[in-house]
Image (tube, helix red, strand yellow):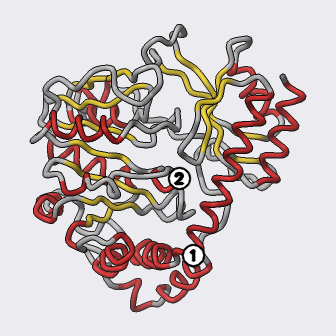
Amino acid sequence: MTVRANIRAMKGYTPGEQLNDPGIIKLNTNENPYPPSPRVVEAIQAALTANNLRKYPQPLGDQFRHAAAAVLGIDPDAILIGNGSDDLLTILTRAYVPEGGIVASPTPSYVLYQSLAEIQGAQYQPLRFQADWSRLAEMPAAADITFLPNPNSPSGTVVSADFLKELVHQLEPRPVVLDEAYADFADSNGLQQGLAQAPNVIITRSFSKSYALAGIRFGFAIARPALVRELIKVKDSYNCDVLSLAAATAAIQDQGYFHDIRSKILATRERMVRELTALGFEVTPSRANFVWCRRRDRDVRAIYEELKRRQILVRYMSYPIGPMGSPDEPYTGLRISVGTDAEIDRLLRELQAIV
């Protein structure tokens, strides 16, 4: 059998290491360090009946859509469910990008965007950030779709609200996808800024981070209802199962628990920035549930490897280029997820010994 040439040529997306031994401190994949809401476990247990499991789930996730709409103050028909936000990014690429088309996104950023372009047989157009990460240094040229993660990974930074509006206006009617997987840890987001009302904007969200449901695989997109109706044609018929729908519905309804663990993560994040800076790291101010750390005096890959030897996983990342003005090519650093206070205490002690 012959695989398409573009598939043979691509490297493919490489997820972070999933070593789930209980003795390992796992700070490499931006999982929430706290358990999900107790209501989630109750909802999954209630859904685990023979009758529920033998039947197909709701194809559009109507119960979740109404629950999320009530929390977010939007129309339920403006919501599209997905098997994680990556599923939604795939749906959007399939819907908008022809073979030979163009997919644009910033760099350094989420490398899945390039993989999606390659799978589609499209060209990938990387866009550099300005030095302070608040804007792109250039606008996409004739892209069929532009992905903009906000907050960005690995930097944890956000672009300015003024730049977002400028980008959306300049690219209309071409689609702009605001990938807001980490937006719950930021001070504002595209929904609050009214960008979901723009005819060419789709906002994607994940339950893997702020709702502590990475193992469930659930996400959703927000866009104008007329646009959502078109995207429904592209998604798999039943792309979310009964357990993920039950879990996500319960999670988004428990906003008290959500805000409690969010506050804990933000407090720990600020402590990490202070103490990692004191250890000699250059730490980019983060609006996500991780921090981006670099050093000019030594190879951070060696630090990553020594931490791993000491049973602490962080993410070593390397990009061909950095933001404008960066003297380092390749542009490398350590992305460290916010853990519990006890986990971060251990990380800092080990880093003190290493550096």
Q: Amino acid at mark 2?
A: Phe
Count the marks: how many? 2
Task: Establish if 82 lies above or below 21.
Answer: below
Mark 1, secondary structure of its residue:
helix
Q: Is residue 56 visible?
A: no
The part of the image, by quadrant, that contains residue 118 is top left
- The answer to whether residue 317 is seen in the rendering is yes
- Figure quadrant of the N terminus: top left
Residue sitting at x 50%, y 85%? 48
Image side of residue 30 versus residue 65, left or right: right
Tell me, for residue 185, which label it has, or none: 2
- Relative vertical location of residue 134 with respect to residue 184 in this rendering, above or below: above
Mark 2: give few (<14), some (14-19) or many (20+) Cα within 10 Å.
many
In the rendered image, the vertical position of residue 31 relative to residue 173, given as above or below: below
What percent of the width, then of the height, locates residue 335?
A: 61, 34
Residue 274 point in image, percent of width and height:
74, 36
**The quadrant where residue 323 appears:** top left
Q: Quadrant of residue 45?
A: bottom right
Q: Position of residue 280 (x, y in %)?
A: 76, 22
To which residue does mark 1 refer?
256
Q: Secondary structure at mark 2?
A: helix
What is the CA distance from the residue labelled 1 to the residue labelled 2? 15 Å
The residue shown at (26%, 64%) is 80
Q: Residues within 10 Å of mark 1 (few under 14, many from 20)?
A: few
Residue at left offset 53%, top offset 56%: 209
Which amino acid, mark 1?
Answer: Gly
Above or below for 222 versus 157: below
Q: Earlier in the sequence, mark 1 or mark 2?
A: 2
